[in-house]
Structure formats: structure tokens, C-alpha cells
Image: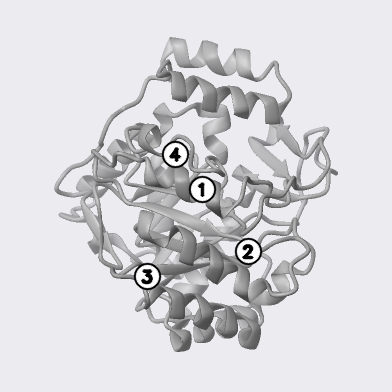
Amino acid sequence: MKLMERIGLTVLHKFDPENAHKLALVAMKMGVVPLSGVVTSDRLKTTICGLELPNPVGLAAGYDKNCEVVDELSRAGFGFVECGAVTPKAQEGNPRPRLFRLTRDQAVINRYGFNNKGMDAAAANLARRLNRHKVPVGLNLGAGKDSADRPGDFAKVLATCGKHIEFASINVSSPNTEALRDLQGEAALREVIERVIAVRDGLNKYLPVFVKIAPDLNLEELTGIARAAQKSGADGIIATNTTLEREGLKSASAGEAGGLSGAPLFEMSTRVLAQLSEITGGKVPLIGVGGIGSAEQAYAKIRAGAHAVQVYSALVYQGLSLVEEIALGLDKLLERDGFEHVSEAVGTGRNEWL
């Protein structure tokens, strides 16, 4: 971490976490945040579901909920960027405070509840992106808190924003919208996916659709999700969202309600990832997310079965320079182990997690 970045993080951590995040977005818009530019190599360039990535290290949803700093994030070293979650209508989300740093645990708890400005605002912001750096940008599709037709909500957001993005993810795994996780059941999930795919098929381009799942699932539930995803035409699975588990935490805010992300999630999410890879025989593209804070952990996710990975919570503590550090470190690890390309490493360590 560079000195100015360390100073900046120290200043931000003096603010309430939600206000600090807003300040970080403002700073990025103003151009005062150092950005790494595109990080790539022949070993890191990869393709997932037709998306050409300069490297397999992406940004997870939640950082840029309203797609306000897409161009800036595309220059921050990521191989792909996921914005959102976005719902059809603007909604305030849950009451504040709703975001908590767990510094001793290098973790975060949030109970935002899909706060965002709605799909029309997101579409307008996405339409203005320059995309000079050819980094694929995707959108996390959400459902309204009080919606009577949640499967239809996901489809509506894609219909409005689809022409401005390169991929989409269906968020049926946030713990902060009541009963949303019920949509992970096989029958319910098939309906959601089919309605989103119907919209996707009406676009004048191919757009991969992923399903983002929770880590708090057993083997039977994971098998049902994999079956639903494959039968309904989803292109891949993102594993995983935040957890409701709290075991072993040391920070004062550990008892706050909401989804836990960051370092404590790493082992749980990686095990789910490996189980999905085993269930699908490695044939379904998987994106591994949850607790990644180093190149070694990104590599572990890939070896567990991930074709690409995403980071977010670790940036709160280590800054945006972590993205370049992970990508370059991953390149060295692949070279050390004799892999000429990152795709060769996918799933090679899966049995270590089963």
C-alpha cells in the first residue's frame, strides 16, 4: 500500500462507514484516487462465458450501487466490474446505521437492503460510460422490498439496463431483503432465471447471466441450485454472497444484524465454491467471491474451481492498490507452479476443500 493511500484510508476510517464510502466515491469522481490502469499478461488474460477479461480479478457488486464511477473503476486494475444491486424503483433501504467495520476481524457487516436510485438512474449512468479500457461491466439485478412479483423485478431491471452492460447477475442471496433467499429454492429459482433469460434473449447481443448464491447452503440445496441454473439457461454461478454466521468474531460490532463479508467468510465461501465445482463436474463457469485479501487467496479460489474471482471488503482495509497486487501476485503464483495460463489452474485444488 502506498503512503498516500494509507493516509487516505486512515482519514476515511475516522468517518462513519457509510459516509466514508460516499466520500471515497466522490474522491474517485474528482480524479484524486490513484488508479492502476489495466493490469494484464498473457498468463492472466482469460475468457469466461464469452467475456474477454484482461485478468480474472473483478470487483464484486455493492461498491458502486448506482453505476456512478464505472469508468474510474475500469481503470483501477480490475479485469471486470460488477455494479449494483439495482431494483426497478428507487428505494431507501434499511434504517441507518447499516454498515459496520469489524477491524479486528478484517470484516464488514451490512444490512443496506438494496438501497439504490432505481433502474432508470442506473441506465442513464451506464449510458454515459466511455468504456475506453474494454473492461467488461456487469449489473447485479435486485428485487424491490415490497414487490409482489420479485421474479419480474429482475427481468425489468435487465430489460432497462441490458443494452448498456456486458453481463448480469441475479441476486437471490442478499440476507437483507426479507424472504429474498427463498428464491434459491430450485423451483422458484428456475422461474426467476427463465424470466431473466427471456429478456436476455430479446436483446440484440449475447449477455451472460450469472446467479449469485449464499454461502449458508447445504449440499442438497447447492445441488438444486446447480440443476436449476443448468436447466434454465443461466451461464454461470457467483459463489458467494455474505453470510449470517458469526462464529469466532472478535470485533465490538460482531452482533449486528446483516450479512458478514471479509476475511471470516473465506473458508466457508471457498468450500461452497469447491462443492459447486464438484457437483457440476467443473462444466459450469464459477466466479469465486468471499474473503479474498491476497493473491494467495485468489489463487486458492481458482484452484478450488473458480474461473474468475471478485473482491470488495478487503479494499476497505487495504485500498484499491490491492487489486493490482492480487493480479500481479497471481501471475507469479501461476508461473511458480508451471501454469502457462490461469485456466489451467482452475479446479486443480478442489479436493482440498471437499
Q: Which mark is residue 294?
A: 4
Question: Is residue 168 visible to the viewer in this orientation of the structure?
Answer: yes
The residue at 40%/73% (across/down) is 200
Rendered position, 190 above or below 15: below
- Amino acid type, label 1: Ala
Q: Are marks 1 and 2 in contact (CB under 8 Å)?
A: no
The residue singled out by tag 3 in the image is 285
Q: State which tag comes first along the sequence, 4 or 2.
A: 2
Q: Are marks 3 and 4 in contact (CB under 8 Å)?
A: no
Quadrant location, the N terminus: top left
The residue singled out by tag 2 in the image is 215
Marks 2 and 3, how far apart in space?
17 Å
Rendered position, 297 above or below 38: below
Marks 1 and 2, how far apart in space?
28 Å
Q: Nearer the viewer, mark 1 or mark 3?
A: 1
Marks 1 and 3, how far apart in space?
27 Å
Image spot of residue 212 (x, y percent): 54, 65
The residue singled out by tag 1 in the image is 122
Marks 1 and 4, how far apart in space?
31 Å
Q: State which tag comes first along the sequence, 3 or 4.
A: 3
Marks 4 and 2, how far apart in space?
20 Å
Label 3 neighbourhood size at 10 Å, few (<14), some (14-19), many (20+)? many
Image spot of residue 168 (x, y percent): 44, 62
